[in-house]
């Protein structure tokens, strides 16, 4: 595969270029093909070590990165905070350096605090070692691989064989739910706003503060404190989990009332474009963000495609950043 990929770490989508998005989509298409073959594996990262440093619980992101690394023939080290030396007082940077000493080439990092993957990447650069860092979700800040797999999923709906960013021009995308606490929303907003789409955010005012309008540099971001205007004629609706673990105050009267006012239901879908599709990064609070029957309806729900796309997209990311050290 020919690419002119230069980015060593993937920490945030804030400064990604359209060309980079297309390179990721094209690379993910090739890996999607690999995953459809009988062996499902390529020797691309043979001899390299991927360290999965998940300081915060995760099911799908962690498994998805693990499978992606295995499909690329890398050796993988998994780290769980509960059983690690962190409980003995080791610092995060020292944990990362321990994995470095074991020969880790790529570090995939999730942490409950914003900025941890950036700090580890800065330390690796300061040490002048050839280690790539991939942010797998930091606090309420960024979750680039989730937004990129969402992008691949959406573009594949628009053209299965040739998903590409040009297909998104003029599409209306609604992002509904706990935007305040969501790193997925922030990465998706950064990505979609730079790609000629119309992004409509909808949530109760406590979960959608006005400061989000600061991201509106190209006049394509709209904030709503009611769901209806966001859904009107929308091509895609992204729903987000209510992040109860991050809510420090009582931000909602009740989950039932949230569902009544902001839940995605079959009757609300009537407002959307007839071909509307729904995304959710998971884990889902069934019957809260989205009605249970809609979640399981393959005519509307892209939830399982998102999970499937995740492996091909994460293979693409590990491959591309790994390329920056091909002289190893
Ligand atoms: C998201 C996360 O962890 O940020 N989930 C995920 O990565 N699949 C969203 C969430 O937890 O609600």
Image (cartoon, rainbow, N blue to C red):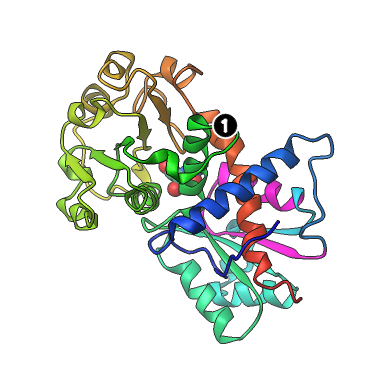
Quarter where residue 291 is shown: top left
Percent position (x, y) of residue 31? 69, 45
Q: Is residue 221 left or right of residue 31?
A: left
Mark 1 closeness class: few <14, some 14–19, many ≥20 residues within 10 Å: few
Instruction: Give the position of the C terminus as an image quadrant.
Output: bottom right
- In the image, residue 115 sits, relative to residue 67, either above or below, namely below
Q: Which of 214 and 112 is in front in this view?
A: 214
Residue that numbered label 1 is attached to: 160
Quarter where residue 288 is shown: top left
Magenta stretch: give its range.
47-70
Q: Which residue is drawn at 36% across and 41% down?
A: 169
Percent position (x, y) of residue 14? 38, 61
Q: Residue furthest bottom?
A: 127
Q: Is residue 170 visible?
A: yes
- In the image, residue 123 sits, relative to residue 186, either above or below, namely below
Q: Nearer the viewer, residue 246 or 162?
A: 162
């Amino acid at each position: 595969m020919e690419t002119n990929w230069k980015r060593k770490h993937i920490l945030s989508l804030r400064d990604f270029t359209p060309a980079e998005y297309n390179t990721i989509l094209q690379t993910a298409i090739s890996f999607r093909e690999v995953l459809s073959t009988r062996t499902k594996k390529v020797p691309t990262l043979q001899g390299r070590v991927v360290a999965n440093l998940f300081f915060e619980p995760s099911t799908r992101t962690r498994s998805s990165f693990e499978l992606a690394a295995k499909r690329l023939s890398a050796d993988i080290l998994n780290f769980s905070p509960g059983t690690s030396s962190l409980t003995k007082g080791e610092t995060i940077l020292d944990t990362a350096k321990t994995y470095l000493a074991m020969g880790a080439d790529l570090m995939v990092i999730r942490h409950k605090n914003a900025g941890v993957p950036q700090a580890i990447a800065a330390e690796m650069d300061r040490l002048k070692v050839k280690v790539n860092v991939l942010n797998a979700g930091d606090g309420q800040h960024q979750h680039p691989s989730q937004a990129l797999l969402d992008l691949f999923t959406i573009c594949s709906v628009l053209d299965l064989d040739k998903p590409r960013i040009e297909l998104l021009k003029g599409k209306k995308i609604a992002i509904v739910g706990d935007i305040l606490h969501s790193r997925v929303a922030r990465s998706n907003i950064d990505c979609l706003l730079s790609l000629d789409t119309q992004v409509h955010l909808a949530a109760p005012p406590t979960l959608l503060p006005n400061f989000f309008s600061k991201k509106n540099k190209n006049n394509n971001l709209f904030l709503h404190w009611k769901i209806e205007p966001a859904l009107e004629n929308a091509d895609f609706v992204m729903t987000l989990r209510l992040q109860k673990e991050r809510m420090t105050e009582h931000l909602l009267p009740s989950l039932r009332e949230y569902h009544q006012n902001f839940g995605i239901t079959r009757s609300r879908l009537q407002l959307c474009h007839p071909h509307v599709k729904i995304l959710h990064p998971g884990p889902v609070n069934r019957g809260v963000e989205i009605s249970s029957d809609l979640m399981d309806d393959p005519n509307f729900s892209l939830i399982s495609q998102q999970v499937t796309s995740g492996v091909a997209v994460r293979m693409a990311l590990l491959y591309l950043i790994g390329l920056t050290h091909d002289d190893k």
